[in-house]
Image (cartoon, rainbow, N blue to C red):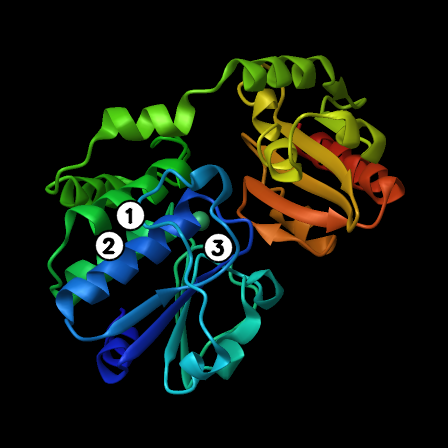
Amino acid sequence: MFEAIIQAIEAHDTVILHRHASPDGDALGSQIGLKHLILHNYPGKTVYTVGDGAGRYGFMADSKMDEIPDEAFRDALAIILDTSGETLISDQRFHLAKTTARIDHHIFIQQIARHEVTDSTAESCCSLVALMAQEAGWALTPLAAQSLFTGMVTDSGRFRYDSTSARTFRLAAYLMSQPIDTNELYRNLYAVDLDQARLRAAFTQKIQLTEKGVAYIYTTKEEMAALPADLFSVSRGMVSVMNDLKGIDIWANFTECDQGVLCELRSSRYNINPIATSHGGGGHMKASGATLKNREEALAMLRELDQLMEEGQ
Ligand SMILES: [Mn+2]
């Protein structure tokens, strides 16, 4: 399955690893994991990780990105991980690379690279990288295993989402043949400080319901400016206060910012991806996102979600 990508890695002395902007555990995990797999199995190769900062995933080992000049791309292979749309890639200089490849588990929207493997049945990009390591017969290292395991955990909601499969557990077991401190990992991922707990409580109070029972939170620019939190922790971080509410099958978090209104859409039952895509976004069947123009577009989206609820009943 990964033959062409493995050959491309073998054929290039320099490999540059990209992933989507505002990285999550899977984006960073696949990047760091693949970096250490290549370094360990092909001594002498140079591997760089590029992109914006690790943010709340800064606890992950080796998550500091490299700063490299344009020349570094000239003879390099650039591999794009965990990204479905070209504009979402952090550090657009992959265009300068000699060859490109992509490994992704989002719903396919476009070809970006020369060699591509996309499998939307995988719960995480990290598990695809783990699968490639098995296929190539690469040896694991503790850091590679730990990074890939982190992405599997975060993108599967700690092995809870329906994308979690027998293959997920087989690959998790394979990674756990290396020493992975899960207590430490889960503490880093799930322990919240008191301020964050209070912020979540405030967002719980902000939950509203549409006529058909779609839950949503809308945060204006003014409210955002007054909050002790950054855009990502509100937009991606607070959508989860609506998880696990009985009788709520679809929920959305809207956050105004300079670019428009960030929208994070989730569902426990319905495929909300086409609605996100029709508003210029993308993602997965039950978890997608989009950047909307304004509040009117957010309200229009809520009407479409209401319609989806109605059709589903
Ligand atoms: Mn992912």
Q: Quick check: 29 above or below 14?
A: above
Q: Secondary structure at mark 2?
A: helix
Proximity of marks 1 and 2: CB atoms separated by less than 8 Å: yes
Residue 219 quadrant: top right
Residue assigned mark 3: 106
The yes-or-no answer for disc 3 within 8 Å of ligand 1 is yes
Give me the C-alpha separation between circle 1 and circle 2. 7 Å
User: What is the x, y in percent for residue 146?
Assistant: 24, 43
Is residue 247 among the parts visible in the rendering? no
First in sequence, mark 1 or 2: give its number: 2
Q: Nearer the viewer, residue 286 or 180?
A: 180
Compared across the picture, whether 105 is left or right of 93 comes to: left
Q: Nearer the viewer, residue 109 or 41?
A: 41
Residue assigned mark 1: 148
Residue assigned mark 2: 130
User: What is the x, y in percent for residue 292?
Assistant: 78, 48
Give me the C-alpha separation between circle 3 and circle 2. 17 Å
